[in-house]
């Protein structure tokens, strides 16, 4: 648990300290989701107490933030590693299933991915991510016999 928290803190430091090499650049593209990961970061317990007449009720629940990592690939073969925080797990990347393509826009060090909520009939929504890494798609080399 402590190792996970330290890893997340290290990522946060990168978000804050690393200068943005793509500042000022805007680009529209189509990306295909490759993989994703969700990490829960506990932040404590929230309790509420209610009194009805002579009865007192306590309702306690653990609260957390969610750290999402999404890897996407553009049509030109560039692979992007994206991250974002969310307060609720259902409010984020569950709409971006691996292997599907989505329109996206890069603005500086951020990528906004657009999707249709509830499939192709729902309203258009967007998720904004911080770009953590940009690199060419790894090419598999054939094994030598």
Image (cartoon, helix red, strand yellow):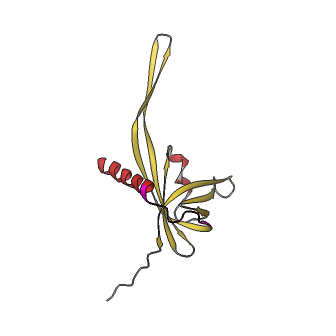
- Residue at figure coordinates x 45%, y 20% from the top left: 57
Q: Is residue 19 magenta?
A: yes
x%, y% of residue 134? 48, 68
User: Looking at the rendering, which quadrant does residue 10 occupy?
Assistant: bottom left
Q: Is residue 100 above or below residue 144?
A: above
Residue reaching furthest bottom?
A: 145
Number of marks drawn:
0
Residue reaching furthest left?
A: 2
Residue reaching furthest top?
A: 54
x%, y% of residue 129? 53, 56
x%, y% of residue 77? 52, 75
Q: Is residue 30 magenta?
A: no
Please indicate whether residue 104 sits to the left or right of residue 51 in the image: right
Q: Is residue 48 above or below residue 145?
A: above
- For the C terminus, the quadrant is bottom left
Please indicate whether residue 42 sits to the left or right of residue 88 in the image: left
Magenta stretch? Answer: 17-27
Nearer the observer, 77 or 24: 24
Dominant secondary structure, magenta: loop
x%, y% of residue 41? 40, 45
Q: Is residue 8 above or below residue 64?
A: below
- Residue at figure coordinates x 39%, y 84% from the top left: 142
- Residue at figure coordinates x 57%, y 67% from the top left: 31
């Amino acid at each position: 648990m402590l190792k996970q928290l330290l890893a997340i803190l290290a990522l946060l430091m990168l978000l804050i300290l690393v200068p943005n090499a793509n500042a000022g650049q805007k680009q529209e593209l189509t990306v295909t989701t490759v993989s994703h990961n969700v990490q829960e970061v506990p932040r404590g317990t929230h309790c509420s107490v209610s009194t009805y007449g002579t009865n007192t009720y306590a309702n306690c629940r653990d609260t957390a933030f969610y750290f999402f990592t999404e890897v996407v690939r553009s049509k030109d073969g560039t692979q992007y590693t994206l991250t974002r925080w969310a307060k609720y797990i259902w409010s984020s990347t569950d709409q971006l299933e691996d292997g599907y393509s989505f329109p996206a826009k890069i603005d500086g060090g951020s990528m906004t991915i657009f999707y249709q909520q509830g499939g192709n009939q729902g309203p258009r929504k967007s998720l904004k991510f911080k770009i953590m890494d940009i690199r060419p798609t790894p090419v598999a080399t054939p094994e030598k016999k």
